[in-house]
Image: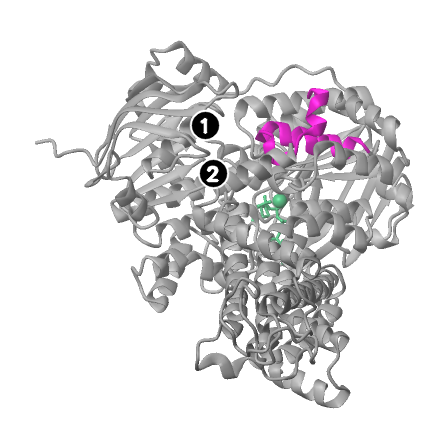
Amino acid sequence: MKRGNLARAIRAFPWSGKLGLALVLFWITIALVGRLIAPYPSGAFVSYEVFAGASGKFWFGSDFLGRDVLSRLLVGAQFTVGLSAVAVTIAVALGTGFALTAAVGPRWLDELLSRAMDTLISIPSKIFALVLVAAFGSSILLLTLIVSITYVPGNFRIARSLAVGLARLDYVEVARARGEGRPYIALVEILPNMIRPLFADIGLRFVFIVLLLSGLSFLGLGLQPPDADLGSLVRENVNGLGEGALAILVPALAIASLTVGVNLLIDAATQGKVQ
Amino acid sequence: MNPAPHVEVRNLIVTVPGPDGAPLRIVDDVSFEVARGEVLALIGESGSGKTTIALALMGYGRGGAAISGRIRVGDATLDGGGASLAAQRGRQISYVAQSAAAAFNPARRVIDQVIEPALIHRTASSGDARASAVELFRALGLPSPETIGSRYPHELSGGQLQRLMAAMALITRPDLVIFDEPTTALDVTTQVSVLQAFRRVVRQQGATGVYVSHDLAVVAQMADQILVLNRGRVREHNRTGKLLAAPADDYTQLLIAAAHPHVKAQAAVPAKPEPLLEIAGLHAGYGPIDREGRPTLPVLSDVSLTIMRGAAVGVIGESGSGKSTVARVVAGLLAPVTGTVSLAGEPLAPTVSGRTREQLRRVQIVFQNADVALNPAHSVGDILGRVLRFYHDLRGADAQRRVAELLDLIRLPAAVAERRCDELSGGQKQRVNLARALAANPDLILCDEVTSALDTVVRGAILDLLADLRRDLGVAYMFISHDIATVKALCDEIVVLYKGTTVQSGRRESYDTPPLHPYTDLLIRSVPELRPGWLADETVQAAAPFAHMPESTHLCRLLPRCPLAISGRCDAIAPPLRKTSAGHMLLCHRTEAELIG
Ligand SMILES: Nc1ncnc2c1ncn2[C@@H]1O[C@H](COP(=O)(O)OP(=O)(O)OP(=O)(O)O)[C@@H](O)[C@H]1O
Ligand code: SF4
Ligand SMILES: [Mg+2]
């Protein structure tokens, strides 16, 4: 029954939504199996020519050190999609968790959380990252944490306004009058009614995180060589820009298609559900 | 000489995909026209297609409805011009819906929401819109019109929200206003003033109106012509006076008969002479408590009442009188400032957190608005199952069996358990809402306006159900309503609240004859009568001699509205509580003899 609904909803998408869905599914697949289907090890120097064009051997040519662009892209996509997914999960879990606590908790706790989030949101994300990386050195763990924490307050704001609105509805009052505890009220009565609008937010934050991670990598603060995400691929091949090398165009296109795809999908999914 | 009518509908047919896929006509060949400045009423029971027609006027079909026929509003026609109609809606056509509570965003101040249409359609600047909103608040009789806008929706009563919603619809000075049961959820004294306000504002603005209702008596006051609908077909269409005086169609005759509900004779249910709930000296309100121990917004002052085991006690009063507040205090959702609430002799803690689960189980609350009282994310089975698990630790097959029993008790098929609440009709939702309370096996159910949002036929069925449940299960009710006829149908005893004080209490029969408290009298006289001029007559009701006096908490709260106020007494000292010879209590300076006279 649920499945049928989903299929029907997808069929009702406009073409842009279907394109978005296809792009998202494509990138999820790449993230899952990319490492397995990469023709060469991602760090191996396989070509004598740098910034080579497309050929039967190297579909997307070679990079500034003569490595296979396709292989690096397949592995890099896994970092980008995987890290972003983990980071968005942490950000939303924390943001929405705090929001629910604020909505069902005592007023002072709500005030405290809201003020703390306001403070956090006022710190520019790149500078925040810069300071932390300078202090602790770049690592995947730190990177994930930085990126997640950056997006907690934004999610908190949206989730809190949703939750506070829902917490005043009669069905929540009924649950309160029954003697239900706060966790039950937050998780069973309120949370399920926030899911749809939250999904839109999750999608958007995912896009922001992909862009932030790529941006950080481009600045050299992100993943450190030999690991590389899509952003690092763009950065390390930046010298190829003048000759229009595939090594820089392909990862840039990859970032674009991933973020555009997620956006199109969110638009379609949230619009169809207004009524 | 006849200019073209302002609104013209020809052969309107609305079809929706039926359950078996075959198209289903929910509106079948309806035609009418409305001249500029006139009001047409669409009347019929729930499901008769009233709202569908109203929505079609705005070029809007719900859930894949296909509209055919010709609809013209002003210069815009629907055939081929659907887009232009859509652009008009909200500016030249506006809509006042039944459930104002659901139409407001709980997290924004009401004034911002009221002026939003004017800003969206750019008919006024923000400052002007605010000014005209305040004008409308005043015209609509809202208290403190300058400041009421800065409140949040949950700080306002149902009647206040309904009027705010009308203000939202009228702020753009629309040509056509569609009222969809706008007073169904209001109490009578409010309804009278809201109806008067609507009529005045509609006349002032020269707007054309389409008024959707199931209540003939209300429609008789508002409309120039009436169209009676049944199952999507026109049964009768005539000028208001003619239709009421000489109904031609047998369905119209039925409706006219139902307008005066004959309460089904009930076997009296003996209440056991053992007090179940005792409320004594209750003071309560909202907002922070000041140094003298009074809340910023005091609502209840010195309310006392007792409910015997198995009894049904009605609480009536107008919107904002604090009826729901009483229920909220009893349920432990709001801590009283002073006063005690005890259940079967045991004093109850002020809030839920201090009460035992057993105490909580014994008192259940059912809210007014079933649309927001049931969580749309859960199925009926989950909702009932949770209560069973919470209070009775019933799980699995036992719980399922009990859910089926409960559904049977409220006369819904067991298959409803699988359904989500947003798939149910209004009457069904209200039954589920009741079943959730019953699932706890309570001794007392606090019913807060459980029938107010329902139409006459469904309301009758729910009242019958409540009466049967009481007889079979021995459950007691605190039945809150603004409708004295409904309360009389169900309750043995009635308490009348005015601005948070009890002005009269006593057995049901004592409300049939004088002496009545002046406010009770007003309540009873506010029930609309089935004749066109009634609303106009009602405005010439005796003037109150102290209408200029501000309301004071130390004097009778009714003073500014009371036609019987005595100079030198009512405006000087608080009224005494009198016991009449018939055994009921009145809070008034007037003696029994004076009130009869
Ligand atoms: N949470 C709240 N905060 C502040 N004021 C409130 C709150 N809830 C209700 N009020 C105010 O308290 C007064 C009494 O409200 P209450 O809901 O008890 O009235 P009511 O008699 O049930 O009215 P109605 O018939 O319209 O439901 C009203 O003036 C209302 O505006
Ligand atoms: S006490 Fe006076 S003002 Fe109050 S209801 Fe009685 S007569 Fe009217
Ligand atoms: Mg109420």
Q: To which chain does the residue with label 2 belong?
A: B
Q: How far across and down, in percent of the image, does residue A49 sit?
A: 55, 78
Residue at the spot 62% in from the left edge and 74% down from the top edge: A67
Of residues A271 and A28, the one drawn nearer to the viewer in this rendering:
A28
Image quadrant where residue B413 sits: top right
Q: How far across and down, in percent of the image, does residue A7 sit?
A: 57, 37
Of residues A22 and A128, the one drawn nearer to the viewer in this rendering:
A22
Disc 2 to disc 1, how far (Cα)? 10 Å
Residue, disc 1: B215
Pointer 2 with pointer 1, Cβ within 8 A: yes
Where does the C terminus of chain B fall, quadrant-wise?
top right
Magenta stretch bounds: B411-439
Q: How far across and down, in percent of the image, does residue B260 sit?
A: 50, 20
Q: Is residue A79 left or right of residue B71?
A: right
Q: 10 Å neighbourhood of mark 2: few (<14), some, or many (≥20)?
A: many
Q: How far across and down, in percent of the image, does residue B276 sit?
A: 85, 36
Please state which amino acid type lies under the numbered disc 1.
Asp
Residue at the spot 64% in from the left edge and 25% down from the top edge: B462
Q: Which mark is residue A71?
A: none
Q: Which mark is residue B183?
A: 2
Of residues B560 and B490, the one drawn nearer to the viewer in this rendering:
B490
- List the single residue furthest toward the left: B1
Label 1's element? Answer: loop
Q: Does mark 2's beta carbon lie closer than 8 Å to ligand 1?
A: no
Q: Is residue A190 left or right of residue A216?
A: right
Of residues B518 and B119, the one drawn nearer to the viewer in this rendering:
B119
- List the single residue furthest toward the front: A48
In the rendered image, residue B413 lying in the magenta stretch gets the answer yes
Can the viewer see residue B326 in this picture? no
Of the image marks 2 and 1, the number of the one nearer the N terminus: 2
